[in-house]
Amino acid sequence: MSQHTVASFDQELEELRRCIAEMGGHVEKMLADAVGALVRRDVELAQIVVASDVRVDALQREIEERAVLTIARRQPMAIDLREVISAIRVASDIERIGDMAKNIGKRTIAVSGQFEPQRVVLGIERMSDKVLVQLKAVLDAYMQKDVEAALEVWRRDGETDSHYNSIFRELLTYMMEDPRNITFCTHLLFCAKNVERIGDHATNIAETIHYLVTGQTIAAERPKLDRTAFETGE
């Protein structure tokens, strides 16, 4: 990585990357814990996940403040400016991932004590495992400015959509079989959708990495396979 004439500028950029890394590690744990709490019906762990979101929000504010100060002091250009702007974008996506994990925690608390179709819950866990791998990969790609690794995450977004579509149809079946299933199935549906949206935010980060390194947006259309909005007329 090239060094700037003003060493403090490099330190400011490094501090932005450090905050992003801390934020990313925090939401990775939040997602794993949130889905783990759902599978094990662990209300206490779900409550910890909900409370953890405060730290993610604080880190996002810190990143934004640092980025604005860096722009004001250094007036960066070219890749330096892209790096600061990208930090703001990535922090925003990570913050939203934290919100999604927190929502799963809240849903877990809401369905506590209710019957849950364990097969669907395990399906959500499998989807979450795949999304967590994607999230870790894209955050590593951001730290290393690895465009190819980022594009690999971007190309695999459709896999998460396919998994979500399957869970969506299965939950609809449970609801149609017995109206008493509607409440907890609705909560599970939102949990699955939150995991799917986390995959979307990982893809957003991949697109930001491409912009950071190349200065260009990805021209191709994102490989989306989520058919649920079409099927429900939304």
Image: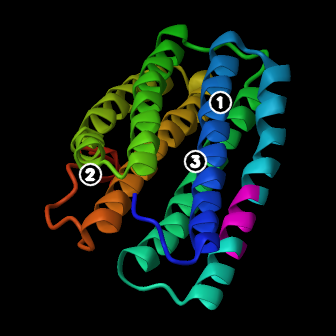
* The stretch drawn in magenta includes residue 25: no
Query: Which badge, 3 or 2, is on the more N-terminal residue?
Result: 3
* Of residues 114 and 166, the one drawn nearer to the viewer in this rendering: 166
Q: What is the magenta range? A: 59-65
Q: Is residue 16 above or below residue 191?
A: below
What residue is rendered at 53% in x and 57% in y?
93
What residue is rendered at 76% in x and 46% in y?
53
Q: Residues within 10 Å of mark 1 (few under 14, many from 20)?
A: some
Q: Magenta span: helix, strand or loop, mainly? A: helix
Query: Which badge, 2 or 1, is on the more N-terminal residue?
Result: 1
Q: Quadrant of residue 2?
A: bottom left
Q: Secondary structure at mark 1?
A: helix
Q: Is residue 183 visible?
A: no
The residue that disc 3 covers is: 97
Q: Amino acid at mark 3?
A: Ile
Q: Residues within 10 Å of mark 2 (few under 14, many from 20)?
A: many
Between the residue at mark 2 and the residue at mark 1, the CA separation in whole angstroms equals: 25 Å
Q: Amino acid at mark 1?
A: Lys
Closer to viewer: mark 2 or mark 1: 2
Residue 26, image x, y percentages: 67, 39
Between the residue at mark 1 and the residue at mark 3, the CA separation in whole angstroms equals: 11 Å
What residue is rendered at 78% in x and 20% in y?
112
The residue that disc 2 covers is: 147
Residue 22, image x, y percentages: 66, 44
| Disc on res. 29 | 1
Q: Is residue 111 left or right of residue 149?
A: right
